Image (spheres, rainbow, N blue to C red):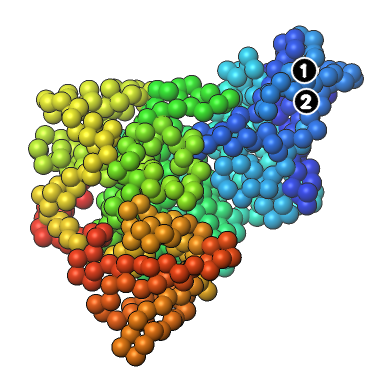
Amino acid sequence: MPHTTAPVHYRVQLHDLHAHLFRVTLTIAQPSARQRVSLPVWIPGSYLVREFAKNLQQLRARQGEESVAVHQLSKHQWEVDCEAGAPLELEYDVSAYDTSVRTAWLDARRGFFNGTSLLLRVHGQEALTHRLQVQASPEVPHWQLATGMTAVAVDEQGFGTYAAANYDELVDCPVEMGTFWSGHFNAGGVPHRFVVAGAPASFDGERLLADTQKICEAEIAFWGTAPHASYVFMLNVTHDGYGGLEHCNSTALICSRPDLPRIGVDKASDGYVQLLGLISHEYFHTWNVKRLRPAELVPYNYDQENYTQLLWFFEGFTSYYDDLLLRRAGLIDTATYLKLITKTLNQVRQTPGRQVQSVAASSFDAWVKYYRQDENTANATVSYYTKGALVAMCLDLKLRQEGSTTLDDIMRALWLRCRGGAMTEADVLAVLQERTGRSWQDELQAWVHGTEDLPLPSLLAVHGIQPDADKPAPAQALGLRVQETHSVLLKQVLRGGLAEQAGMMAGDEWYGIELATANGPQAWRLAKLEELDLYVARGTTQITALVARDRQLLRLPLQLPPATTPAIANYKLSVTDAAAVERWLGH
């Protein structure tokens, strides 16, 4: 049994690259009699029970030279027939075949894991020092390792032993391995590292570093202090991916290759702006959700759902500031920012579920609804990300209109009031009362706990931005969300729309149309809904949609939206007072 000075010690080996297996050896220096261990069922920051234990196999245990029995108590908990006091060693394998930021991945090109996917929790010893040893593999001698965990004894490539103060810290530090690109910068006096796996030769790493540095400096200045001594960005570049997961001193990110900045290309693509927004979002979480966080999540319960009604604040307000801080950092201009918030406005406006579910209820239901979307999601739910961002915008604009303070000041005051720790909605109301001299109970009740539309048009107008109606896309006008390839696949049919009234349903394939013309009946094949303008004469009020459902062909009478007064219009924003807009966006 290996010698270790840590109460809890893990050795992680790259056991079989082609079978995608990590091997973990857990040594407990002073186990309890009948020691219990478990693997978390979820990872903080991603509010879904993901059942990580499904990937754990061949768990075995021994004390000294003797094997001891392991009994499974539940889907993710085990009890070991061991004696108290004598070192206990557990060994097991974990299948790692998930490219997301939430779990673990291993093949001959790259390795990655979150501790919640690999490292068993030793019950009763969570507060003790934990050590993690990651062994290099001779099969991939050129691999490097990056993590935010504190190094104890590591080689120049990063493999070796790391220390964590407790289990929470251990599993909050993901590990990236491979032949990745790596760069460094300082922001606010804090060293930052950025590693990128899977980037093509056209990747402009220096631009990504410079732009990320501006984001970090803007956010440290926003909060007034950096709560971390160092920080690591880990970006995995794939053919088609997007997402991120925050940690206290690091983040794991995914983007698609076209989203990266390219050498010799000065103009920022929409994909690159989206990537910068993701970086801004996850870095803002360093303060807002990793430290200042819902009281219900202090401490984390790794065994079950952790319910809170506050994701509208922690995800939604972060979503408000992610793009706003890009604007303040000079990485996007006002026109680009307005384009981004227009997208958010219209996403919420085109969601019938906003009139069914409050954003507080959406937060609470994240565990069963947000991460398990289906054909009815848009009709029954609203996103705490997008509507939460609009609640933040409403609050900021209203505070600025009244002239007493801004949402920036409220965020910093909440950090101080809660000492960068547990927060409740009562804390939000108390800080608003302190800063403005009046109650904000009515606003939060309506905006957060109600389902009426937010007063954004009037608030934007006060700050120099005019929201006008814009013609919706064909799918929106019909009340559809679709996938267009060789035919039109209906992904969602929105409540109260013309498509629903015609009898269409999610899963239908819309192949074509029939219509009456002056020259007699005609039928046309459809590949995209924009082709309706080609085949249907202006002024036509009804056509027949030809759809397939369960391989049965159906002819459905479809009323067309009026050309002049669409039932559901998008917003388009225009600047009417540039100085007022600058007062809002500039600080």
For image coordinates 51% across by 24% down, the residue present is 300
Count of labels shown? 2
Label 1 crowd bin: few (<14), some (14–19), many (20+), radius 10 Å: many
The vertical placement of 405 against 330, above or below, is: above
| Residue closer to the observer: 194 or 51 | 51
Whole-percent x, y for residue 423 in the image:
35, 24
Left or right relative to 60: residue 308: left
Which labelled disc corresponds to residue 571? none
Mark in the foreground, 1 or 2: 1
From the viewer's perspective, is 27 left or right of 195?
Answer: right
Residue position for label 1: 80
Q: Using the rendered image of the protein, determine whether residue 80 is visible from the camera's viewpoint.
A: yes
The quarter of the displayed image where residue 385 is located: top left
Element under label 1?
A: strand
Q: Is residue 210 above or below residue 367?
A: below
Q: Residue at x 41, y 77 (%)?
A: 514
Asked which quadrant contains residue 4, the reply is top right
Where in the figure is residue 406, as x and y percent of width and height?
18, 38
Kindly identify the residue that appears in the image at 30 percent across and 88 percent down.
518
Specify whether 526 is left or right of 417: right
Q: Position of residue 256 (x, y in %)?
A: 52, 60
Question: Mark 1 near mark 2, Cβ–Cβ under 8 Å?
Answer: yes
Say which amino acid is labelled 1.
Val
Q: What is the distance, in whole Å, between disc 1 and disc 2 at their CAs?
A: 9 Å
Name the residue rendered at 48%, 46% in the picture: 373
Residue type at mark 2 is Leu
Question: Considering only order in the chain, which callout, 2 or 1, is on the residue closer to the N terminus?
Answer: 1
Q: Residues within 10 Å of mark 2 (few under 14, many from 20)?
A: many
Image quarter (top left, top right, bottom left or bottom right) of the N terminus: top right
Which element is circle 2 on? strand
> Which residue, given by chain and number where applicable, does mark 2 sit on?
90
